[in-house]
Amino acid sequence: MVTFASEPIFHLGFFKITNTLLNTLTVDAIILTLSFFIIKNLKFAPGVFQSGAELLVNWFYGLTESVAPINAAKIFPYFMSFFLFILVANWTGLIPGVGSIGFFEHKKLIPILRSATSDINTTLALALISAFATHAMSIGTIGIKDYLGRYFSLNPINLFIGILEIISEITKIISLSFRLFGNIFAGEVVLMTVSGLFAFLFPVPFLLLELIVGIVQALVFSMLTMVFMAILTTPHHVQAKEVSHK
């Protein structure tokens, strides 16, 4: 049975090492290993793997430029990092043994590894990192004066709009974290249920569906972060002019 809370595997003093934390470290290790492998094997005349990687990166960078043409170079590393981490985290949860190999405690199976994004703590941490990076980039790009002017004003109407903007920023964090968590957790529950009823063949379509869901959810989270960064790195008066022209 899949539970909302991640299960502790062992303790380091007072610190609990959970199965989702172990999966997070595994995902980090996979991404870092692939990164070092690609860097060490870069060639002037690229092979099939390098060509595919370059095409993918160029496509994603072009997508970033289409949304934020001025600040694409600043936003792209965050966009790509979120996408890669979430994608690998989503897909590692589909590997046979993840979520099913473990030990029994009080007649309950405790899996050694569990998809990191099926833990609300992980998705909330990702959403908080996204929000912090977005606001830090906004301050560094447009300056503290324009940044604060988005939320605070002596004009009562603009002040009310600023309060709504602050509430919106809080709801963005909740929305980002719960959307990712809900989709991945629900998929994990479905796969566990189907696999428990039918051991062969029948779960395959659900696995393929979860592969697609993993890509979609990684894209949704990273692209929303990209859009939020593009909006907050544009001065408020520039946005107002664009709206008035439209």
Image: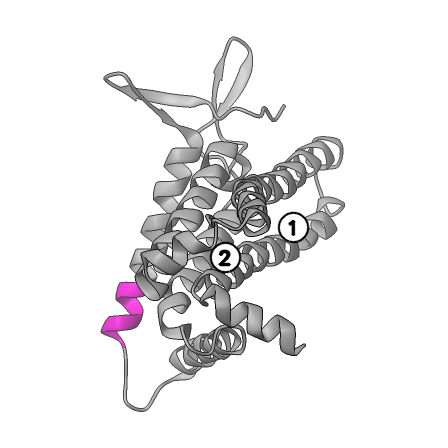
Residue 100 pos. (x, y %): 54, 32
Give the mark, 2 or 1, whose residue is nearer the N terminus: 1
Query: Is mark 2 in CB contact (under 8 Å) with mark 1?
Result: no
Which quadrant of the rendered structure holds the N terminus?
Answer: top right
Label drawn at residue 225:
2
Left or right? Give the position of 34 relative to 97.
left
Q: How far from the left and from the top, in percent, is residue 223?
A: 54, 62
Q: Amino acid at mark 1?
A: Glu
The 10 Å Cα crowd at callout 1, few under 14, some 14 to 19, many 20 or more, is many
Name the foreground residue: 36 vs 69. Answer: 69
Residue 231 drawn above or below residue 107 = below
Q: Residue at x 51, y 58 (%)?
A: 228
Element carrying mark 2: helix
- Residue 192 in sight in this render: yes
- In the figure, is residue 201 to the left or right of 30? right
* 25 sits to left or right of 180: left
By secondary structure, the bulk of the magenta-drawn segment is best described as helix
To which residue does mark 1 refer? 210
Work out whether residue 209 or residue 245 is closer to the camera in this orientation and state it: 245
Quarter of the image for the C terminus: give it. bottom right
Compared with 99, 103 (above or below) is: above
Q: CA distance from mark 2 to mark 1?
A: 22 Å
Residue type at mark 2 is Thr
Magenta span:
35-41
